[in-house]
Amino acid sequence: MALAYALLSSLLVDGSQSGYDVVKCFDEQISCYWRATHQQVYKELREMEKKGWTCSETIAQTQRPNKTVYSITDLGRQELTAWVLQPSQPTAIREELMAKLKSGFLVPPTALIAELARRQQIHQAGLNALKAMEATDFPTVFTAGAKSLSYEARLYHLALRRGIRYESEWVEWCEEAIQAIGDYQQ
């Protein structure tokens, strides 16, 4: 997936935002399925503006530097629509930990267990954050069910649920791996 489409989607759903706000939103809402550095986001915002997919407005501020607010244009919306209609391909897994695990017999089991426990904590923190976001952004799901959501909100909730499952699966797998490797400790 091109970063531009994730950013266009954010601008479409969340409305006009400064670069800082886009990065913050990206980190909080999209990072469970797409990661980008601040530099990548700002560079892509400028590129999208050159293509006419976004427009920007500079807002003067007295106590802070001026800020640039980006909005999606009609051309950007058309481009995003065309992209949504294209078939998607599964992303190949590139997980360094799996390669290390395959060669893990070179180190003591305690070293692998320590790394797995560290990763489990990282994914547990991600899971907690996503569940908190779900509770804040979709409180009616817990009382009235998902059918109470608008179509737009339901789609966003589905993406959030995938992030929750991703983090949950990591937490569970780390626990499984820790137990399995623990059987070989002496």
Image: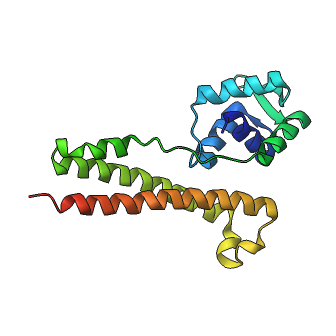
Compared to 23, does 118 lie above or below? below
Res 171 quadrant in image:
bottom left
Residue reaching furthest to the right: 74
Q: How many marks?
A: 0
105 shown above or below 169: above
Residue positioned 59% across, 59% down in the render: 162
Nearest to the observer: residue 80 or residue 144: 80
Q: Look at 67% across and 61% down and name the residue there.
A: 158
Q: Where in the figure is residue 41, as x and y percent of width and height? A: 65, 30
The residue positioned farthest toward the left in the image shown: 186
User: Percent from the top left, x then y, of residue 53?
Assistant: 83, 31
Residue 63 percent across, percent down from the top left: 70, 26
Q: Position of residue 31 (x, y in %)?
A: 58, 45
Quarter where residue 77 is shown: top right
Q: Is residue 107 above or below residue 152?
A: above
In front: 185, or 44?
185
Q: Quadrant of the N terminus?
A: top right
Quarter that holds the C terminus: bottom left
Q: Nearer the viewer, residue 82 or 160?
A: 82
Horizontally, residue 159 falls left or right of residue 97, namely right
In the rendered image, is residue 164 in sight? yes
Task: Give the color scheme: rainbow, by chain, secondary structure or one colour.
Answer: rainbow
Residue 62, can we see it?
no
Q: Residue at x 42, y 43 (%)?
A: 95
